[in-house]
Image (tube, grey):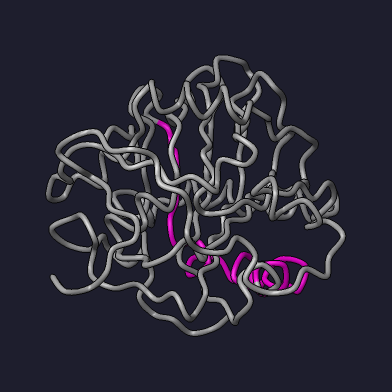
Amino acid sequence: MPDRADRYPTRLPEPAPHRRRVDPVVWGRIESPALTEFDAAGFAILPDLLTPDEVAEFGAEVGHLAQDPALFGDDRVIVEPRANQVRSVFEVHRLSDRIAELATRPEIAGLARQILGSEVYLHQSRVNYMPGFGGTGFFWHSDFETWHAEDGMPAPRAVSVSIALTDNYPFNGSLMVMPGSHRTFVPCLGETPDGHYRESLRRQQIGVPTEEDITALAQRHGIAQFTGRAGSALVFDSNLMHGSAGNITPFPRSNIFLVFNSVANRLEEPFAAPAPRPEYIAAREFAAV
């Protein structure tokens, strides 16, 4: 599609200046008090999204998924590069009826509708596991940069909900974010290799900003951290700069990760990749939740 407009060019041969976001952050009307600071900060923390009983229930569910022999060798299962333990299981709303139901709840999907100003569908779902003594982190990145370049998402009109199933401490690899960075798009360098996505899900090296980029953003915005007890959740904009360190403690960390995209922001052909990623990573069925 050579004639289409690309407002967020990335995967470039040479460094390019940071670009001011040209799209809204909040497309609808915020009604939930929990989202009051979302437009300015790019994220919101929900302290008690799940009850303790639900945490136990979903914890058992994701534990079963990680050990299910029927999923051994399944492309949707990503293994830690060093610990040889399950790192992520994708498309979990199709593997678990309970997680599929969770994604439709008004206190979850309803928040996404408020932010995105439309009906929403699940662009991606997964469970993330960060085992003790071996969980590796992710370098700083914007999810939208990848979704735009490799999946063909036109605009940053998507929002993620990360639901903690274990306590998130400052020392066990909890997510770090840069408040306000969602208003700056950082172009990344280098072409997208064909078929690289599986390695990228284990250790991201394509579509990451430079250390100079991260230094400039951190000096401008500072760094915050999502910590809290199991059952809490982080709602964050698709272009928010975030990352996590590895986990060398004995305290594992796991979360359910749900990405809602606006039905008006459906995926096209990739903007900077030779072919789209598989549908278990980037859904191309746009039925509203």
Instruction: Give the x, y percent position of residue 7.
Output: 34, 61
| x 29%, y 49%: residue | 73
The image shows residue 63, relative to residue 288, as above or below, that is: above
Of the pair 261 and 227, the residue shown nearer to us = 261
Magenta stretch contains residue 74: no
- Can you say which quadrant of the picture contains the N terminus? bottom left
The image shows residue 63, relative to residue 282, as above or below, that is: above
| Left or right: residue 77 compared with residue 59 | left
| x 21%, y 55%: residue | 272
Q: Which residues are magenta?
A: 85-112
Magenta stretch contains residue 90: yes
Instruction: Give the x, y percent position of residue 219.
Output: 57, 22
| Left or right: residue 240 compared with residue 74 | right
Instruction: Give the x, y percent position of residue 232.
Output: 77, 46
- Can you say which quadrant of the picture contains the C terminus? bottom right
The residue furthest bottom is: 287
Of the pair 101 and 17, the residue shown nearer to us = 17
Q: Give residue 198's quadrant in the image.
A: top left
| x 53%, y 67%: residue | 93
| x 25%, y 47%: residue | 197
- How many marks the image carries: the answer is 0
| Left or right: residue 212 compared with residue 20 | left
Instruction: Give the x, y percent position of residue 195.
Output: 16, 50
Q: Give residue 187's quadrant in the image.
A: top left
The image shows residue 13, relative to residue 30, as above or below, that is: above
Of the pair 219 and 209, the residue shown nearer to us = 219
Of the pair 224 and 68, the residue shown nearer to us = 224
